[in-house]
Amino acid sequence: MLDADVNALFFHNMDELFDTRVVTRAGPVSPLLREDAAPPGLKFEGKAYSYDQFAEATYTNAFLVIRDGKIVFEDYRNNTHADMRFIGFSMSKSITSMLIGIAIEHGDIKSVDDLAVEYAPELRGSGYDGVTIRQILEMRSGVDYEERYDFGENPSLAANIHENAIVQNKERFADRAQTIKRKVEPGSRFNYATLDTAVLGRVLEGATGQAISKFMSEHLWEPAGMEYSGFWIADGPPGVGRELNGMGYNATLRDFGRLGLLMLNDGKLGDRQIVPEAWVRASTKMKPIEGGEFAGPHSAYGYQWWKLDDRAGSFIAVGLQGQFIYVDPRSKTVIVKLSYFPPDAPEEITDMTVAYFNAIIGWSPAQPR
């Protein structure tokens, strides 16, 4: 699936590899008007790139720019097209955050400062006992977990979870949360952990009494007027496997764009409030990352949303191997990039991508072509 020679294909065919849980659409489609324009170029590290050169250099499968609620540029590459569902990988974490906010608004969860075990009692006695939902959203749970995939004779915990849950389907992704230990005081240190988001999935299930896919269909996907149904990949067959809510959501390019528009518009579609406005603001209020591999001059983290540049107010959903939903409220811009970065892609590819997002923010689209 992740092999550089084939991932351009598999990243939009995940339902051929996994059991899935469909997130249905219903009702009128939220319209996206068009004012197509030629995209800007980029100057990066002393070299000039056209859009096509940038797209090739950064392994692009699909690219979308929405400005003032209208599509101004849309591109599909490598035999992809508009009705294909692409894997979002860890952009799924940002979607999970939106669902937590909706569950709080509906009264299923009383407060972001509730303990996770109040809704997922199976976690009592584990490292997650005594940890709040807020601390998990901020990736500050304090549990003894490293997002390190060391396979082989002595696999890491993350590799064990990956093998047993995602590949073999012998356990559920979040099962290890029941036995994991605590490493540091909850809230004291940022530690990126997909297991944290899987625990948020358990909290959602326990709080709402619904599967994540059903709750999301009823309270996010259908009200938002999505054009196509989406799907979660699951860690086992129906009736057993759960939605891989930390890394497994698949949707079309435009529907990922509609998620970005919801966040841009403070959770509203027209006059309808879908994601609470207060939640949009709270979840994109960033805390600096104190150190480690994710630290950087502009790196910060909110409730499962990232900050990767110095543009005031901007935020971004980020997924493995080059998946992005970038939101810039000041310019009323949403950018979606769906990619197939090779597993060993250099950091410069992400830097180049963020630089191009900033070039788009400073771009004034020409007259429709």
Image (cartoon, helix red, strand yellow):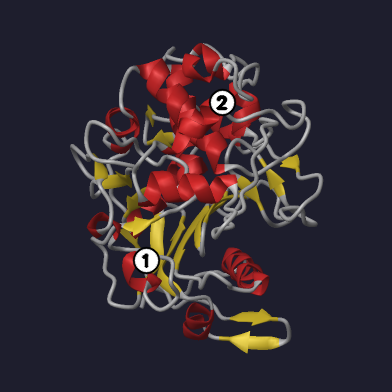
Q: In this view, does 192 lie above or below 76?
A: above
Examine the rendering and report whether any part of residue 341 can be seen: yes
Q: Which residue is drawn at 46% across and 23% down?
A: 203
Q: In the visual, does 163 lie left or right of 297?
A: left
SS for callout 1: loop
183 shown above or below 104? below
Distance from label 2 to label 1 (Cα)? 31 Å
Along the line of sight, which residue is nearer the eye, 350 or 39?
350
- The spot of residue 110 in percent (x, y) is 51, 11
**Residue at 29% of width from left, 41% of height from top?**
236
Residue drawn at the location 31% of the way across and 56% of the way down: 252
Task: Count numbered badges in the picture.
Answer: 2
- Hey, what amino acid is under mark 2? Ala
The answer to whether residue 248 is visible is no
Identity, as a three-letter code, of the amino acid under mark 1: Glu
Q: Where is residue 107 in the image (x, y as percent from the top left)?
A: 44, 12
Q: Residue furthest bottom?
A: 47
Please name the residue that numbered disc 2 is placed on: 278
- Horizontal placement of 339 versus 6: left or right? right
Quarter of the picture containing the N terminus is bottom left
Which residue lies under the disc numbered 1?
A: 35
Residue furthest front as drawn: 153
- Mark 2 element type: helix
Q: Residue 242 carries which label?
A: none
